[in-house]
Amino acid sequence: MSIPAVELTGVHKSFGKAKIICGVDLSVAPGERHAIIGPNGAGKSTLFNLITGRFAPTQGTIRLHGEEIQGRPPYEINRRGLSRSFQITNIFPQLSVFENVRCALLWPMGLRYSFWHLVSGQSELNARADDILERINLAGRRNVPAGLLAYAEQRALEIGITIAGGAEVIMLDEPTAGMSHSETDAIVALIRQVTEGKTLIMVEHDMGVVFNLADRISVLVYGQIVASDTPEAVRANAKVQEAYLGAALEAAE
């Protein structure tokens, strides 16, 4: 049996007297597309932040490819092969689309704090940035300031930044939030393409996206996972329907 890409065991998180995550066990296999869903206030964002190092758990262990990462700072977790996007678009608005992607490539390509190198002269770096722009369908917007992109284009750019470092585990926080149906379809196709062969963990409210994209779904309610199974099994789970989905499942059909 292979080592899980991400594994949570007995994870709790409290803020003062408020218990937000209450004993979560979760295992995500390598190459799996895993969605975390649940009602507002269920603790989805907190769980995301625990895995990515923004918060340290009050109790429990979090492993990335078998190695404990709880309590490590986000940059260390990123360098160990996990990259994330944010619910609110997180880009450099005054830099060009190309420069945003190139910035994300500096550390993984070993340039880091090399102040005596001009990035404009790094042919391999620039070629890789252009390749990512092709993959996220923004090559035609290469020199446009990122802040001038349409909302859906900004989300695509953030996905490009997220995958730039070559991380094996990609975490996306509500990647289709605020999009039209056509924009959502385009982003789902992009996510499917750029995460091929990688592990994907996403928080998403759009049940159409979840049931179209995920291999497995975990349902978080009041800080606890009440079900973790295939989309078909989750759809048929009476406890899940009672706790959360109901009409949302019907709308996704």
Image (cartoon, rainbow, N blue to C red):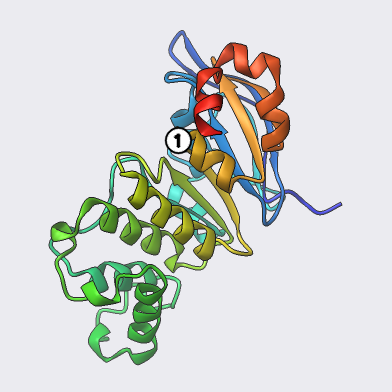
| Residue 94 drawn above or below residue 144 | above
Residue 7 placed where, x, y %? 68, 41
Q: Quadrant of residue 35?
A: top right
In this image, 126 relative to 99: left or right? right
- Judged from this view, the residue extending furthest toward the top is 17
Front-lying residue, 40 or 116 = 40
Residue 106 placed where, x, y %? 36, 73
In this image, 59 relative to 18: left or right? right
Residue at 34% in and 51% down: 183
- Residue ID for mark 1: 206
Front-lying residue, 150 or 82 = 150
Residue at 70% in and 21% down: 237
In this image, 200 relative to 158: left or right? right
| Residue 220 drawn above or below residue 76 | above
In this image, 174 relative to 215: left or right? left
- Judged from this view, the residue extending furthest toward the right is 1
Amino acid type at mark 1: Asp
Front-lying residue, 187 or 41 = 187
Q: Quadrant of residue 180?
A: top left
Residue at 21% in and 59% down: 92
- Could you tell me how many numbered marks the image carries? 1
Mark 1 surroundings within 10 Å by alpha-carbon count, few (fewer than 14), some (14 through 19), many (20 or more): some
Q: Secondary structure at mark 1?
A: loop
Visible residue check, residue 10:
no
